């Protein structure tokens, strides 16, 4: 890890210096205003956070350190992690160093496996995954060093050490969740000859003669790697991390947020929606039948999963990347075709109804159908895949937040009396 530490030390030094200058000069510049509607509207559109790993543009989607995520699909997930963290893609030597570190940290402790095995069979895979991460908290170097009394300048180094340990172990943990939940606990050993993402695909144990499933998993891991700092899980991660809790606490907490149906659980919900629709309308799929099914869903007061976005106002470019994969590798898959049909019908309906700010397909619209095609049919596992990928963004953000010594996050809330005095009475 020495090369990475020394590269980061230089970058962090530079950033600390430039932030100091920016704040001295422009610290009082206003970046956002907050209306009462926004206070009651999830703070949508309020700018109040700093995150350098990636940004999400309404018409471009996620941009990782200046690279559109769709331009990164031919890189390994660990190369993208390096990019998130340092701002540059690794050289061959830098990648080799990172790969060695991840492999050295790939083992999953027995007590974690035993903890997972002790849970009720009905436990959701996300509960198992998050608990597994939390169970490893006793390994935190940051926590040990903090209690010994380290300098604030070194917080990020121990956060980096914890992060590499956690990222190294996450494929084995997520695969263990899958094998314990769905295959009675028959675990598959890590293969030291494989890269981080291929190892994850290998340990899941899905038959993959063509290697296409491993390619899909790596694509999935790259596309979901990060989504700037204000989405629910990243924000949760930042809040927990800002208390100086270590990355085992913050990552596990962030993933409890990812487990919500409007966030990471949407990919499970989208595929369940497609499977239910298939059952309901039968094998003869027509545009009219899909339209009616979608209208009935809306009439029942439900959302159509896989469509809409809090920030994007175009088709999610990550949808396009998966779509390209589907076209190339499984154009005749019935599940892939179903997504194709849906995307021709649902946006028009949402536009007609006029409520959704974006009627276009998001990434969750298609990822589950491709996974299903290759035999990963357990939809309640899909959010864990999301977590394996997002661990890269969250850990990078945690390290960089420590580097700039982000203070504890503590926005102010208001009560009804404040609204009466400061809004209603003032308007009279
Ligand atoms: N189906 C039906 N109604 C929808 C809709 C959809 N796919 N998307 C938005 N709407 C509705 C909202 O429910 C909201 O209705 P109310 O005013 O009655 O509450 C209205 O349109 C306005 O919502 P919005 O501003 O367009 O969307 P939000 O920013 O509030 O929420 C999201 C965004 C993703 C939660 C929402 O579009 C949704 O629920 N989509 C379906 C779930 C889904 O696919 N989630 C995956 C998100 C992917 C990601 O985060 O990357």
Image (cartoon, rainbow, N blue to C red):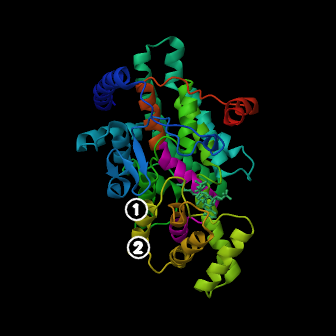
- Quadrant occupied by the N terminus: top left
Name the residue nearer the viewer: 47 or 246. 47
* Looking at the image, residue 201 lies above or below residue 108: below
Q: Which residue is mark 1?
A: 215
**What is the residue that sits farthest to the front in this orientation?**
428
SS label for mark 1: helix
Of the four image quadrants, the one with ligand 1 is: bottom right
Residue 343, position as x, y percentages in the image:
52, 73
Q: Looking at this view, is 124 or 182 the one in front? A: 124
Does the magenta segment cover residue 377?
A: yes
Magenta stretch in the rendered image? 368-391
**Dot label at residue 284:** none
Give the camera-side residue of 320 and 151: 320
Q: Position of residue 331 (x, y in %)?
A: 44, 78
Residue 326, picture quadrant: bottom left
| Left or right: 369 as drawn, with respect to 74 | right
Residue 329 - label:
2
Badge 1 vs badge 2, beta-carbon distance below 8 Å: yes
> For the residues marked 1 and 2, what is the alpha-carbon distance in whole angstroms?
10 Å
Residue 89, visible in the rendered structure: yes
């Amino acid at each position: 890890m020495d090369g990475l530490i020394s590269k980061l030390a230089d970058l962090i030094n530079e950033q600390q210096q430039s932030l100091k200058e920016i704040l001295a000069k422009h610290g009082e510049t206003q970046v956002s205003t907050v209306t009462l509607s926004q206070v009651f509207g999830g703070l949508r559109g309020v700018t109040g956070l700093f995150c350098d790993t990636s940004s999400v543009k309404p018409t471009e989607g996620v941009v990782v350190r200046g690279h559109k995520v769709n331009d990164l699909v031919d890189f390994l997930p660990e190369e993208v992690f390096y990019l998130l963290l340092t701002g540059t893609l690794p050289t061959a030597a830098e990648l080799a160093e990172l790969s060695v570190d991840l492999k050295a940290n790939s083992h999953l402790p027995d007590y974690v496996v035993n903890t997972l095995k002790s849970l009720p069979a009905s436990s959701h895979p996300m509960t198992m995954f998050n608990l597994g991460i939390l169970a490893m908290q006793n390994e935190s170097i940051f926590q040990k060093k903090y209690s010994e009394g380290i300098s604030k300048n070194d917080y990020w180094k121990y956060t980096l050490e914890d992060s590499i340990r956690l990222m190294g172990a996450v494929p084995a943990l997520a695969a263990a969740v899958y094998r314990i939940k769905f295959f009675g606990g028959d675990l598959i050993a890590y293969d030291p000859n494989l890269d981080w993402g291929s190892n994850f695909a290998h340990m899941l144990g899905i038959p993959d003669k063509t290697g296409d499933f491993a390619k899909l998993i790596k694509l999935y891991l790259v596309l979901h790697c990060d989504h700037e700092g204000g989405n629910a899980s990243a924000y949760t991660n930042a809040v927990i991390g800002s208390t100086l809790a270590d990355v085992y606490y913050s990552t596990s907490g962030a993933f409890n947020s990812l487990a919500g149906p409007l966030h990471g659980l949407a990919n499970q919900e989208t595929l369940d929606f497609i499977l239910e629709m298939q059952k309901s309308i039968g094998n003869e799929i027509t545009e009219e039948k899909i339209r009616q099914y979608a209208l009935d869903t809306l009439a029942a007061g439900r959302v159509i999963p896989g469509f809409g976005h809090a920030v994007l106002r175009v088709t999610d470019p990550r949808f396009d990347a998966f779509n390209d994969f589907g076209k190339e590798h499984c154009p005749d898959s019935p599940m892939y075709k179903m997504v194709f049909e849906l995307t021709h019908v649902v946006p028009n309906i949402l536009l007609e109804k006029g409520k959704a700010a974006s009627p276009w397909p998001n990434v969750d619209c298609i990822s589950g159908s491709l996974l299903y095609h290759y035999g990963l049919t357990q939809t309640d596992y899909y959010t864990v895949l999301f977590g394996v990928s997002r661990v890269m963004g969250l850990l990078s953000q945690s390290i960089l937040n420590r580097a700039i010594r982000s203070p504890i996050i503590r926005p102010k809330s208001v009560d009804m009396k404040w609204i009466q005095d400061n809004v209603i009475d003032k308007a009279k």
